[in-house]
Image (cartoon, rainbow, N blue to C red):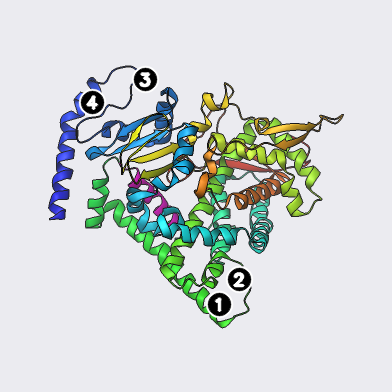
Amino acid sequence: MELVVSLFLLGLSLLLLFLSASRAHTSRPPSSLALPRAYPLIGSVFSISSNKHRRVLWIADILHRSPSATFTLHRSFGSRQVFTADPAVVQHILKTHFPIYHKGYALHRALGDFLGNGIFNADGDTWKFQRQLSSHEFNTRSLRKFVETVVDTELSDRLLPFLSSAAAGDPVVLDFQDILQRFTFDNICRIAFGFDPAYLLPSLPETKFAKAFEEGTKLSSERFNAAIPLVWKIKKLFNIGSEKRLRVAISEVRDLATRIVREKKQELREKASLDSVDLLSRFLNSGISDENFVTDIVISFILAGRDTTSAALTWFFWLLWKHPNVEKEILKEIKEKSDAPVYEELKDMVYTHAALCESMRLYPPVPVDTKEAAMDDVLPDGTFVKKGTRVAYHVYAMGRSEKLWSSDWAEFRPERWLKMVEGPDAEGTTKWKFVAMDPFTYPVFQAGPRVCLGKEMAFLQMKRIVGGVLRRFKVVPVAADGVEPVYIAHLTSLMKNGFPVRIEKRSDITSN
């Protein structure tokens, strides 16, 4: 019966699409200020489909034109999605009315096969338990030290030798986005599982686990953003097309993850005194016995640790090439801190920290985050939200809002995050103090009770990579002058078609 109803609804929606197609293109007002036209039953499916390739930029354009920085998108079969770039609304959903706004059914249904009940897909008591457990572990000094060790080992043993080889002899073009993804994937797998997938080797291997993880992320994201969700549900029922590929990818990821969990449990049983440094060991030692649940948690952390950090760094290195003045300031800071202990070096890299924040303002690793209302509500701007409505705060649009960042919002200017303490002195050196932005205006790491637990770990990793790479190399994009990379997003952002670069050895750290 369910199949018959599903096929009927799909057929009806496709018929309406066909009958309305010509009208959709001829009756729409020519004004660029018009909101997406909505039709009975199918909503704004034409606009959603035609802007599929630039979904993030399309919604950002609408929000920038909206006087309230909030608008409602009509989806198929009567569903609604509210988008906002208003900090007051962000604070409302992430903090003030936090109990009302959950991850929700739609997201859990779309991502649940891949992420299970992991922390980034969970609500209620399941989320609270994982949050409390994870928060405790992330605040331990031993985990921080372990993260430092893993990052430094990957940097010195793999990334830097790989770049050195690429810089020697004839110029070699690398996809730096792929290299950074491989580096962060090895890092987070070692931190989360205590497992080394060896993805960043000189041969650049195509490991099944990494490719399956990437496929699972992409296809799960397409599920969540589908113009007509009924289509993927029917494909899943018949195990065809993208749903068949997703099932294969999920099976690959979860089979290996489950095997690692079982091996780790056995290892912990046999060696009671084993130093439990990776997250998996810590979770297992906390008393969790359900291996599926532990697997869900760790897979979520891999998603967060691999894709977000590599995305942030990809855009950061591109912006540095465009702004040699910023690169010069970072190089000065690296030189000043080069003899300091690791912890002190990272803590005092104030200008680098500001440059990373500024880069993520313009190119956030997670451009949009969505919640679902558990009951009727009214947003601060007066927008009525019916129970079950998805409410999304648009991080990308907020970072490019003139209302929030003034008329120079388009400039890559780390100084907007800094307050001058001393200088400049005779050598042109300035001492800066970092000034954090209100997290509801800059929700790159979320805010409120769900604020990102891995924020400090991410900055530690990014600063070590930036310092290690820039101290020795210049990253030189090979795109033609004036050609801008295209920003796209699945669950996290990407540079479309990769980031082709050449690596050049730096002869003098003070040079630019």
Q: Residue at x 30, y 39 (%)?
A: 386
Q: Nearer the viewer, mark 4 or mark 3?
A: 3
Q: CA distance from mark 3 to mark 1?
A: 61 Å
- Can you give x and y, in whole percent of width and height, for residue 308 in the image? 53, 47
Q: Identity of the amino acid at label 1?
A: Leu
Residues in magenta? 213-226
Write down the residue under mark 1: 268
- What element does badge 1 sit on? helix
| Quadrant in the picture for the N terminus | bottom left
Q: Identity of the amino acid at label 4?
A: Ala
The reply to whether discs 3 and 1 touch (Cβ–Cβ < 8 Å) is: no
Q: Nearer the viewer, mark 4 or mark 1?
A: 1
Could one spot residue 17 in this view of the protein? yes
Write down the residue under mark 3: 33
- Can you give x and y, in whole percent of width and height, for residue 203 in the image? 56, 58
Q: CA distance from mark 4 to mark 1?
A: 62 Å
Query: Predominant secondary structure in magenta?
Result: helix
